Amino acid sequence: MYPCSNPELVAAISEAGGIGVLQPISLTYVHGHEFRAGVRLIRTLTSKPIGMNALIEQSSKTYFERMTRWIDIALEEGVRFFVTSLGNPKWVVDRVQGAGGFVYHDVTERKWAMKGRDAGVHGLIAVNSQAGGHAGPRDPRALYEELADLGLPVVCAGGVSDAATFRAALAIGYAGVQMGTRFIATTECTANVEYKKAIVDAEASDIVLTERLTGVPVAVIRNEYVERIGTSAGPIARWMLRGRKTKHWMRTIYALTSLRKLKHSLHAARGRDDYWQAGKSVAGIDEVLPVAEVIRRMTV
């Protein structure tokens, strides 16, 4: 759940019985920790298993080398659960499996799940149409039915924020759930109060998809800023995104701009240029709670 995965939140989720997943760009850029030191900080807060999210699209040699190093450091520090997305996970599987670890891969439809299976992943994170961030096109049941026969555990990502939606996901057949939006509205998350209030106040109908952040649709809460800039990429951006070579440049431009805005909007008072990622699970969130209470209420 980039960029809100501060060390205290990751640790609290694991300590309460989940698996808190750290995000390296969030840990280093947004929260200002040297990567190994950040992992060790989390380790001082919980002795229970934690995971790492690896965005593995090889958009540049520099980024690939940095992600490889982050994965190696995580393994050295005892992390054994990895969630991969936006690329072929085989090289991560080869690295992690050799250390006795597990890789689950984000997928939005069957063709990506099959590529992940062929690469040797141990499970699938099924990102559905209710998810925050880069949501998929399928509803939770339809996506599960696409993936159920592939012989891998399937985890539901999107639409889960309370006991009822948790039980509904398990009833469909999912092995578990991945939650992001619900954990932003917790006391351990260091996102600013305006972001948390926006999640508490929002309904599912307030979640819209915008191309203006990364070049591909991202689920955000509709607010004044989103209304002002619109949700579609401009004509120059669209032209660049269609090109085999230029799409990486355009996505990099979007990503750098989004990083700066997110870092500001997470920790500063609300301004005119804030946007907040969230999924349709906002419908089941009506208060800010400690992480342990969120998990307790879901499992009673």
Image: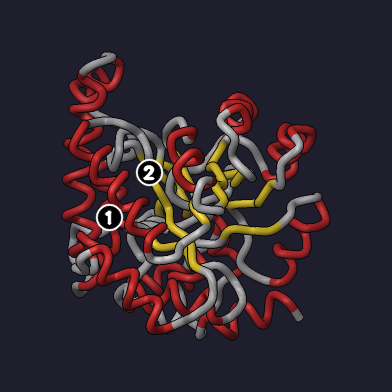
Q: Position of residue 269 (x, y in %)?
A: 20, 74
Please provide percent x and percent y for residue 284.
Answer: 61, 68
Where is 40 relative to 236, above or below? below
| Closer to the camera in the image, 287 or 243 | 243
| Label 1 sits on residue | 25
Task: Say left or right for 196 vs 13.
Answer: left
Callout 2: SS: strand
Location of the C terminus by quadrant is bottom right
Along the line of sight, the residue nearer the viewer: 137 or 127:
127
Locate residue 294, reporting x and y percent. Answer: 59, 79
Label 2 belongs to which residue? 55
**Which residue does the image show at 47% across and 35% down from the upper left?**
89
Q: Residue at 71% x, 35% y: name it.
A: 147
Query: Between residues 74 and 28, which one lies in front from this camera angle?
Result: 74
Instruction: Tell me residue 234's x, y (percent).
Output: 23, 28
Q: Residues within 10 Å of mark 1 (few under 14, many from 20)?
A: many
Is mark 2 in CB contact (under 8 Å) with mark 1?
yes
State which tag comes first along the sequence, 2 or 1. Answer: 1
Q: For the point 43% across and 70% down, which residue is it?
A: 184
Which image quarter: residue 22? bottom left
Rendered view: 99 above or below 44: above
Q: Quadrant of residue 187?
A: bottom left
- Name the quadrant containing residue 196: bottom left
Amino acid of disc 2? Leu
Residue type, mark 1 in image:
Ile
